[in-house]
Image: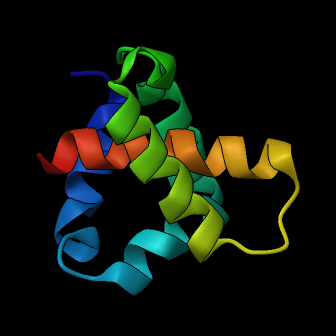
Amino acid sequence: MNLFTEILTRLLPDIRGSEANLLACPDCAVIRECALVHYKSLPKIESLPETEKNELKQYIIKNYPGYQVNQLVERAKIIYSIASLLN
C-alpha cells in the first residue's frame, strides 16, 4: 500500500455513509491528490462496462452542476478512486 492509498484508507470512515463528505472530497487538496495518485493504479474509467460509466457520468453531472468538463473528469476520477476503496 502506498502512502496515498494509506491516507485515503484512513479517511474512509469519515467518507463512508456520508454523501456530503464524499461529494466534498474533490474540493480537499490532500484527498484530491491522494485519489488521483490512487487512480493511476486502477483500471481506467474507460474500461468500465457502459452501464457503470453512464452511472458515474450521471452522478457527477447531477452533483457538480456548472463545472467545466475538465473539472468533471477530475471529479469522476476522484469519486471512482474512493469508491474502489470503499468496495
Instruction: For residue 17, say whether it is visible.
Output: yes
User: As displayed, is residue 7 above or below residue 18?
Assistant: above
The number of numbered badges drawn on the structure is: 0
Q: As drawn, is 70 to the left or to the right of 38?
A: right
x and y, in percent, of residue 78 in the image? 51, 46
Q: Residue at x 40, y 51 (%)?
A: 55
Q: Residue furthest left?
A: 87
Q: Nearer the viewer, residue 33 or 85?
A: 85
x and y, in percent, of residue 20 in the image? 42, 85
Q: Residue at x 11, y 45 (%)?
A: 87
Coloration of the structure image: rainbow
User: As displayed, is residue 50 above or below residue 84?
Assistant: above
User: As displayed, is residue 32 above or below residue 61?
Assistant: above
Q: Nearer the viewer, residue 57 or 10?
A: 57
Q: Residue at x 44, y 37 (%)?
A: 53
User: As displayed, is residue 43 above or below residue 25?
Assistant: above
Q: Residue at x 40, y 79 (%)?
A: 21
Quadrant of the image occupied by residue 13: bottom left
x and y, in percent, of residue 79 in the image? 44, 51
Instruction: For residue 79, say whether it is visible.
Output: no
Q: As drawn, is 13 to the left or to the right of 15?
A: left
Quadrant of the image occupied by residue 39: top left
Q: Nearer the viewer, residue 12 or 44?
A: 44
